[in-house]
Structure formats: C-alpha cells, structure tokens
Amino acid sequence: MIEATSCGGVVIFRGKILLLYKNYHHHYDGWVLPKGTVEEGESFDETAIREVREETDANVTIVRYVGKSNYTFTVPEGMVDKTVHWYLMMGDSYHSRPQRREYFEDSGYYKYHEAYHLLKFANEKAVLKQAFRAYIDMKRHGRWNQNDAPGKDDKPQT
C-alpha cells in the first residue's frame, strides 16, 4: 500500500465557497475543493496555502484546522491510502483562476447549497459541511470579518 498525504482548503469569501472543476482527459470530471501533496520540509498549513494558491490563484489566509479525510484509490503502482488535512480559509476577493496544467477548467465561488450539490465526492461534502458550520459559528460570534483576516499568530499549528 502506498501512503500519501495532501492538504487543502475550504475557502470562503463573503459567504461563498471556492470550487474547482477538473476534467482529466474525459476520464474524470467534477467539482472539487482545492488540495495537493505535501512537499518535503513543508508543514501542513504551508502546503494547504501553497496548493490553494497554485490551483486557484486565490489569496487566502488560514482561519482554523477543520479535520482530515481518508480514502483509497488504485494507480498502476498499486493501492494508494490517502489522508487529506483540511483548513477553513478566508479569501480576500472573488478572484480565482483555475490551474490548467492540473486539468482544472473552471473555478468560482458558490453559495453553500450550490457548492454542496456540485461537489463530486462525499468526503469533500462532509468537510464542506463541517467547515461551513465553523464559519457560521464564527460569524455569529463576531469572529469572522472579511476586512480583518486572521493574523499569522492565529494559524493552527501542525
């Protein structure tokens, strides 16, 4: 079994969630959350920010760690056991541009119910649900302010 670790984000700007549409040679297509592989010497939060920026061109700040998801899939080399660490992130605008070399054809910000139904994978829907609950709770208690993104000291430790 091959073990792999990735990190990604549920990016929210003004109540809307950033999604990517991937089309890999018509064998895979669907809406996903941005995520990618941890590079050597990189912390999980560094990976999450880098991958979101690479895949979407969005400028983001980590708000808090949401949790992890696990799944398996098969590649020619064998079975892959993948763990993805997820972060709730704050975007600084509605700007996004999909990374074409990773087969992303579209990106955009969607209302929660739209994003939930667009997402292809059940594990990403569960992460979205958890992250959005945290976002609503923070807004309700005055701890989410688009004009005052969390500072470096507010980032979760990995």
Image: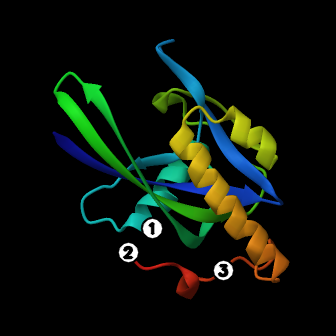
Q: Give the residue drawn at x 77%, y 57%.
A: 93
Instruction: Return the residue nearer the eye: 89 or 141.
Output: 141
Residue type at the position of mark 2? Thr
Q: How would you rate the neighbour count of disc 2 (Cα within 10 Å): few for under 14, some for 14-19, many for 20 or more?
A: few
Q: Position of residue 13 (x, y in %)?
A: 77, 59
Residue contact at pointers 1 and 3, CB within 8 angstroms: no
Mark with earlier residue (1, 3): 1
Q: Tag 3 or tag 2, which sits nearer the N-term?
A: 3
Which color mode does the image show? Answer: rainbow
The residue at 42%/47% (across/down) is 36
The front one of 144 and 51 is: 144
SS under mark 2? loop
Q: Tell me: 74 left or right of 120.
A: left
Q: Determine which quarter of the picture holds residue 64.
A: bottom right
Q: Which residue is mark 2?
A: 158
In the rendered image of this protein, does residue 97 appear above or below residue 28?
Answer: below
